[in-house]
Image: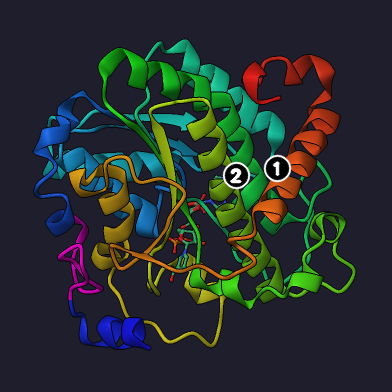
Amino acid sequence: MKETLRYLAGIAGPSGYGSSSTAEEVTEDCSRLAPSHLTAIITGATSGIGAETARVLAKRGVRVVIPARDLKGAAKVKEAIQKESPEAEIILLEIDLSSLTSVKRFCFEFLSLGLPLNILVNNGGIFSQHLEFSEDKIEMTFATNYLGHFLLTEMLLDKMVETAAKTGIQGRIVNVTSIIHGWVKRDAFSFNQLLNPKNYNGTRAYAQSKLANILHVKEMARQLKARNARVTINAVHPGIVKTGIIRAHKGFITGMTSGSGASTTCYVALSPQIEGVTGKYFVDCNESNCSSLANDESEAHKLLKHTRALIHKRLGQRAAQNVSSSFL
Ligand SMILES: NC(=O)c1ccc[n+]([C@@H]2O[C@H](COP(=O)([O-])OP(=O)(O)OC[C@H]3O[C@@H](n4cnc5c(N)ncnc54)[C@H](OP(=O)(O)O)[C@@H]3O)[C@@H](O)[C@H]2O)c1
């Protein structure tokens, strides 16, 4: 209730920021992190919240890698960013998040560039009214929003841990989720159902994929701590923003601009205020509470185990050996 009022009134929370803060405002004090030495990968940066996140991080001096299935769209985003920030370094690489093979190919391509990696923003996403399957024969929303990002994170994690150890700068992973994760009922969340649902419902599939994004954060945060890695992972709800995804999702009230919609992502990716904070859920640039199911450690562990097993199966043993070995 307090949070809803704060959101509607745009009142700042304990961080000093709130629902009306823009991504530029929340990154103004990030110079201590020396953003000019940072490299970030931002998925889904060809439009909406991801494009604004890329613009603002690039404006702060971060080298931005944009993985995109639509390279022409990505080139337009690059052009717009460089028009505003001529020194911005933007690298475009191809990816289809719904395809495990494509994600794997992207990771090899990125790793072959020999660049460091400080920030990974798992932002890309879809909402689909109709049941569709990915080339791996997995329900498309789950494959795109969760599974592709899961594999991306696994394959890039060693690079992030290595970069953090070499530079002394903490690495940060940001999973863009949604407040809608809270709509998922415990008895409706089963791994096989997620892969191949019997009675497809677009809103339910979307909510489940976003719940999986948070469970991923919870389990990875635990594993990263156990590994003593200087890499944090947090989840953010960006607010309700009028973007491509929301236009497909009829019935929502729209409010924020993409400037405000990217603020929580940019805050969690860059702000010195949350140095060392991991495994948390952020809304309007402030730590918030996710659902009890999203906080369930055993559910998070189970999901991670099933996901790794599925990826092993789909990509085959030989390919799986290329995935960060300490995480398999
Ligand atoms: N907008 C909101 O109100 C809201 C609320 C809560 C959470 N979110 C979350 O915010 C994130 C960003 O969404 P948005 O609102 O900015 O939506 P958007 O404008 O539709 O952007 C989605 C991005 O994901 C990319 N994408 C989709 N499928 C892909 C695939 N298979 N491979 C590679 N890229 C793919 C899209 O690329 P293309 O250009 O190729 O389509 C696009 O860049 C999503 O995770 C969404 O769930 C949004």
Instruction: Give whichever of 264, 286 is nearer the camera.
Output: 286
Instruction: Give whichever of 194, 158 is nearer the camera.
Output: 158
Q: Earlier in the sequence, mark 2 or mark 1?
A: 2
Residue type of the residue flagged with mark 2: Glu
Question: What span is colored magenta in the figure?
Answer: 12-23
Give the residue at x 77% y 65%: 189
Residue 325 painted magenta: no
Label 1 sits on a secondary structure element that is helix
Label 2 sits on a secondary structure element that is helix
Residue type of the residue flagged with mark 1: Leu
Residue 75 visible: yes
Quarter residue 37 falls in: top left
- 267 left or right of 109 in image: left
Position of the N terminus by quadrant: bottom left
Expressed as whole percent of the image width and height from the top left, the position of residue 182 reads 58, 74
**How many C-alpha atoms fall within 10 Å of the one at disc 2: few (<14), some, or many (≥20)?**
many
Residue 80 visible: no
